[in-house]
């Protein structure tokens, strides 16, 4: 079977740089950069909205959170794509607030009394976790093989399942209406259902570009209908300033408490797994080598961005999978496009009127959109679990016990009420509890049993006879244990076959793509980087 090196010098003989490092004309940078912002915007602002509503912040405070988030997103994306010293993957990766942190931050904030007092405890945990991520990045990049598909799939499924109840609560009208007649009335449910159906319709009949904007269009459409029916108040938008800067420690100095910090450290551990998957996925799409150093630089960027988030009143950051899909569809691989997108985000973060407009989105509309977004996170986890041999008792137990642990605070809210308040900040998060359970059980069942591990061989990939475009994987024996390899496992690329005939890519034949589900055999263990998410 023919083999070719991953970076074939002849493949880029007609250009001076790899497409990832190509600097496009200003016009194209502007157009493609703004496209990234559109694909990113809805998912970027939903986290501060969910957290602000859960902590019962005022409209002005919520607007401030949104603007601080956008400003930090822009800075973080520029650091990741452009690179500073040994920080940043220097690949087209857009940074955004991770959904993984939503439930733990709500639990931490509510445990600290809600409002801005809760935010101060959240920011203390965020800053500490960001520093730890930066310091641990080079070590974690060498531990990828200890997070097989059964762990990644379980964690992503848990993230989606535990966030869906928050979306359903917003669909009924939001937490502030609980106990009131308006909670769950037909009008609220109609807005939520209408928004969800509109998103589904755009995905069903729209072209790929419109499909990538389905959530954003759904939020705009749902809010427009609610405004026409008199259920949206834009008066706060008129009162908001045109220009404003997010200042460090706007709500006061952060508070550093032990158990919230532990909860956020677990969140960042899960986030590091997500970012690693995203880096490998973008490496496959752009055909650029990814090694441990690349992963370490990407994780350092996550750590720096998270520290900046805690300082500038925002949250933990991760590479956004939505924009990885956009790179795949558009075939625009230049990392400088993401730098341009970061510039747009910074500008939006300096415009309080833009944040106020987003904060005016009705809760039911937001809930309808969030159902689809959080449901897709769970779906990606289930898709990864489809590659795991769940007939193997150890894998089945890791999934079963982790799901059970995650459902404790989600399904039975008072379950940990008798625990000390600080302990509840950790245990009341289904994501933290379930993710930590999956990691520990995998260490117990797999890592300590001296099973062989699967590693990615970036020196060789399949040529025309390959079944997939994923990296070639080989099983190696790890002295400390690993996972049992059954056959030549290859991760899937959910974005389809690679076609380098993009706006600025080399002209070369397209390798064949095997149907999903024919890539590897059941029961394989090892990293599965074809299915990224945040």
Image (cartoon, rainbow, N blue to C red):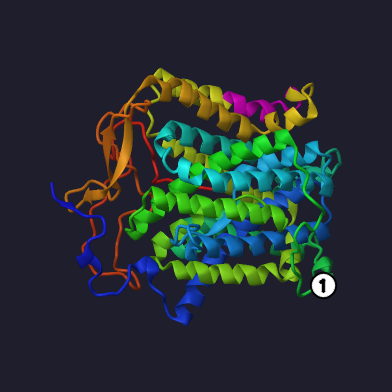
User: 368 or 278, which lies in front?
Assistant: 278
Dominant secondary structure, magenta: helix
x 72%, y 53%: residue:
49
x and y, in percent, of residue 450 in the image: 35, 22
Q: Is residue 343 left or right of residue 24?
A: right
Q: Is residue 493 left or right of residue 511?
A: right
Of all residues shown, which one is farthest toward the right? 180
x 56%, y 34%: residue:
158
x and y, in percent, of residue 396 in the image: 45, 22
The part of the image, by quadrant, that contains residue 502 is bottom left
x 16%, y 49%: residue:
465
Q: Is residue 165 visible?
A: no
| Location of residue 77 with respect to 412 vertically, above or below | below
Q: Is residue 325 visible?
A: yes
User: 138 or 318, which lies in front?
Assistant: 138
Q: Is residue 66 left or right of residue 336?
A: right
The part of the image, by quadrant, that contains residue 520 is top left
| Location of residue 288 with respect to 457 vertically, above or below | below
x and y, in percent, of residue 334 in the image: 41, 68
The residue wearing badge 1 is 238
Magenta-colored stretch includes residue 414: yes
Numbered circles on residues, count: 1
x and y, in percent, of residue 513 in the image: 26, 50
Q: Is residue 358 left or right of residue 139?
A: right
> Is label 1 in a helix, a strand or a loop?
helix
User: 391 or 461, which lies in front?
Assistant: 461
Magenta-colored stretch includes residue 59: no
Q: Which residues are magenta?
A: 404-415
Of all residues shown, which one is farthest toward the top? 393
User: 183 or 471, which lies in front?
Assistant: 471
């Amino acid at each position: 079977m023919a083999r070719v090196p991953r970076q074939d010098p002849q493949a880029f003989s007609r250009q001076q740089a790899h497409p990832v490092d190509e600097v496009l004309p200003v016009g194209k940078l502007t157009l493609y950069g703004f496209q990234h912002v559109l694909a990113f915007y809805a998912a970027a602002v939903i986290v501060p909205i969910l957290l602000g509503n859960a902590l019962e912040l005022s409209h002005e405070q919520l607007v401030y959170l949104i603007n601080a988030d956008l400003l930090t997103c822009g800075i973080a994306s520029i650091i990741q794509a452009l690179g500073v010293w040994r920080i940043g993957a220097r690949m087209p990766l857009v940074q955004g607030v991770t959904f993984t942190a939503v439930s733990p931050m709500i639990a931490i904030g509510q445990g600290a009394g809600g409002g801005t007092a809760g935010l101060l405890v959240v920011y203390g945990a965020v800053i500490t976790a960001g520093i730890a991520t930066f310091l641990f990045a080079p070590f974690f990049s060498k531990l990828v093989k200890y997070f097989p598909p059964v762990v990644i799939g379980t964690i992503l499924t848990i993230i989606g399942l535990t966030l869906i109840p928050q979306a359903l609560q917003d669909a009924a009208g939001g937490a502030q209406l609980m106990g009131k007649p308006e909670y769950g009335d037909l009008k609220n449910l109609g807005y939520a259902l209408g928004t969800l159906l509109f998103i589904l319709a755009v995905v069903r009949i729209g072209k790929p570009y419109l499909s990538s904007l389905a959530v954003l269009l759904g939020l705009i459409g749902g809010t427009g209908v609610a405004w026409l029916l008199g259920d949206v108040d834009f008066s706060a938008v008129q009162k908001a300033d045109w220009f404003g800067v997010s200042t460090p420690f706007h709500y006061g100095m952060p508070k550093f408490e032990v158990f919230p910090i532990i909860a956020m450290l677990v969140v960042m551990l899960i986030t590091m797994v997500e970012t690693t998957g995203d880096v490998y996925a973008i490496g496959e799409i752009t055909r650029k080598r990814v090694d441990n150093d690349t992963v370490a630089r990407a994780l350092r960027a996550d750590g720096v961005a998270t520290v900046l988030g805690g300082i500038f009143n925002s949250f933990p950051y991760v590479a956004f999978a939505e924009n990885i899909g956009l790179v795949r569809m558009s075939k625009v691989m230049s990392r400088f496009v993401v730098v341009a997108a970061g510039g747009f985000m910074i500008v939006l973060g300096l415009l309080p009127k833009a944040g106020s407009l987003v904060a005016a989105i009705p809760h039911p509309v937001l809930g309808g959109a969030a159902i689809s977004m959080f449901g897709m996170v769970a779906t990606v986890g289930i898709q990864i679990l489809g590659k795991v041999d769940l007939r193997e008792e150890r894998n089945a137990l890791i999934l079963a016990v982790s799901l059970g642990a995650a459902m404790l605070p989600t399904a039975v809210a008072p379950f940990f009420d008798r625990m000390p308040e600080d302990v509840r900040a950790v245990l009341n998060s289904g994501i933290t509890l379930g993710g930590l359970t999956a990691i520990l059980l995998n260490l117990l069942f797999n890592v300590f049993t001296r099973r062989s591990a699967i590693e990615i061989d970036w020196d060789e990939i399949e040529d025309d006879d390959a079944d997939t475009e994923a990296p070639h994987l080989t099983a190696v024996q790890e002295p400390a244990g690993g996972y049992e390899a059954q056959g030549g496992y290859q991760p899937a690329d959910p974005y389809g076959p690679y076609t380098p005939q993009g706006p600025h890519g080399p002209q070369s034949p397209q390798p064949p793509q095997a149907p999903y589900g024919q890539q590897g055999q059941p029961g394989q263990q090892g990293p599965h980087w074809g299915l990224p998410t945040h």
